Amino acid sequence: MKETIIVIGSNGQIGTELVNELRSIYGGDNVIATDIKEPSYEVLHGGPFEFSDVLDKAGLQAIFEKYKPTQIYLLAALLSAVGEQKPKMAWELNMNGLLNILDFARTYGVKKVYWPSSIAVFGPNSPKQQTPQYCTMDPNTVYGFSKLAGERWCEYYFLKYGLDVRSLRYPGLIGWKSAPGGGTTDYAVHIFHEALKSNSYECFLSENTELPMMHMSDAIKATIGIMDADASLVKIRSSYNVAAMSFTPKSLTEEIVKHLPDFKISYVDTDPRQAIADSWPKSIDDSYSRKDWGWNNQFDLPGLVTDMITNLKK
Ligand code: SER
């Protein structure tokens, strides 16, 4: 059967790469990119694009009527750091954006919905090492508890209405094709750009702040992987832990120095993002993803650093 896929929030860090990948699989015309902002040249010219605000129900309805999508990827959200500056707006966008899409998906008989969650659903009292799928969750950022509530809604729509919703708890995502915006893990992308530009980087997290991270191409592979999996294999309908690697600014620097021997990092110790990072897991146990639907990552830390530096140099 022909798929018609709408990606909402197509201009963000994940959307930019996901749209291109989905278009290469399903054909450019079958993947409709939507965002509130002007897209990149590639997204604009690779297939249909529509301006759309996920909070504007009339606008959404027009798009659902026009395209009759079979799959939706909802990526529009405010991330952790920006969310703390605009808490009510983060709640409004992250929560009501999701509810709007879940409702339209039901009304229009959409076959599958993808919605990302995050390691931000965990909090200060969650286990820090190998954080399990099921444990204490007391997120203290608006972003984190909007994602946790969203997970509950996704499972609810699956159980109550049979809507086929699938979700992953992404760690920090690192790629060279698109820029992150407003997150706590953004340093791990910025550092590569600054290393190549000026051989130095001033980091907003302290040197031993360990966080779970993943190469963007692994994140795209995981996303399409869970969406392609047979529905019977997707047993968790809130959101799955996924993991690839964990590192600190210090261990990342040690790896970068192998490629750029003169690279120097310094640290600012007054950034509000530090408290957010301190409340999150250091590493993630993703055994349910590996067992249920066959997740495995390709990139480890040395592979990620080599790939980032090689591609950003070009
Ligand atoms: N990368 C996100 C952030 O830092 C986590 O989901 O906010």
Image (cartoon, rainbow, N blue to C red):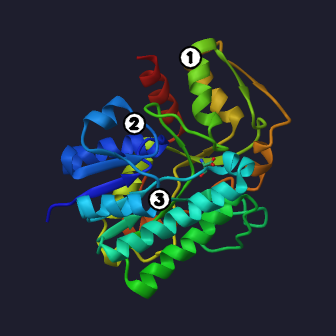
What type is the residue that disc 2 sits on? Pro
Residue at the (31%, 41%) spot, across then down = 20
Q: Is residue 42 above or below residue 58?
A: above
Query: What crowding class fits label 1: few (fewer than 14 Cα within 10 Å), some (14-19), or many (20 or more)?
Result: some
What type is the residue that disc 1 sits on? Leu
Please tell me which residue lies in front, 296 or 27.
27
Does the closest atom of ligand 1 sit within 8 Å of the Cβ of label 3? no
Would you name the residue on which mark 3 appears? 56
Mark 2 or 3: in front is 3
Residue 39: assigned label: 2
Q: CA distance from mark 1 to mark 2?
A: 26 Å
Residue that sits furthest to the right in the current view: 270
| Mark found first going from the N terminus, 1 or 3 | 3
Residue 196: assigned label: 1
Q: Find numbered disc 1 in the image and state the secondary structure of the residue it sits on.
A: helix
Q: Quadrant of residue 264?
A: top right
What type is the residue that disc 3 sits on? Asp
Q: Quadrant of residue 159?
A: bottom left
Residue that sits furthest to the bottom in the current view: 160
